[in-house]
Amino acid sequence: MFSFCYPCLVGNSFKRTEKIIPLIEGFIAQYDKLNELETNFTLHQSFPICMWPKDFLSKMNERGQLMSLCQLHRKSGLILDTELNVLLCNALHQTPIGKARIDFNDEIELDAFFKSKKIVNIYKTLLSSPIENCSTCEDFVNCAGGCLLQTIH
């Protein structure tokens, strides 16, 4: 799997990639060579879909080489750090939202934890459309505006 670097929290600020377009252009320039290799690969792309040539992503999707939307957008994963803190994203390692064995001890308590007002509000805030035009875009369901940390200013 290929993935682009994504921002991470360093102290109280985000360190992020400033040169998104050159990364996309560089990947596109190397794509045919990658595709000729006798190996399967997937690109987990985290930028807004509108930054890519539409036909390029369509081609990758048809070939089963494209993955978008992280577990945070899909609400489909649980990330625990080495101290059993619950993280929403690996890049948010300094901002845990809870802790196993304190906030929950089993699947019933875990379900209640994620349905709690506090956690629902965190997701609501984080998953709001990062760019005004995103929520009306036809690709929003597949993109969600890209990685929320890539689009936070």
Image (cartoon, rainbow, N blue to C red):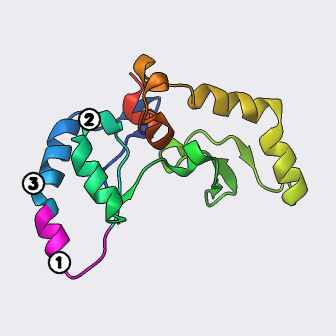
**Residue picked out by circle 1:** 37
In this rendering, the answer to whether 48 lies above or below 133 is: below
Q: Judge the density around disc 2: few (<14), some (14-19), many (≥20) Cα neighbours within 10 Å.
A: few
Q: Which residue is painted at 62% across and 25% down in the image?
A: 125
Inspect this view and state whether residue 96 appears.
yes
Q: Amino acid at mark 3?
A: Ala
Span highlighted in magenta in the image: 32-41
- At a point 82% along the width and 44% down the height, the residue shown is 113
**Residue 60, label in figure:** none
Disc on res. 51: 2
Q: Do tag 1 and tag 3 residues touch (Cβ < 8 Å)?
A: no
Say which residue label 3 marks.
29
**Mark 1: secondary structure:** loop
The residues bearing labels 1 and 3 have C-alpha atoms spaced at a distance of 15 Å
Residue in the image at 35% along x and 57% along y: 61
Work out whether mark 2 precedes mark 3 in sequence or the reverse, and give the earlier one. Answer: 3
The amino acid sitting under disc 1 is Leu
Give x and y (percent) for residue 131.
42, 21
Q: How many marks can you see?
A: 3
Where residue 13 appears, as percent x and y from the top left, is 42, 29
Helix, strand or loop at mark 3: helix
**Residue 47 placement, left or right of 28:** right
Q: Residues within 10 Å of mark 3 (few under 14, many from 20)?
A: few
Seen in the image, is 3 located left or right of residue 71?
Answer: left
Which of the pair 146/50 is nearer the observer? 50
Q: Give the residue at x 12% y 60%.
A: 30
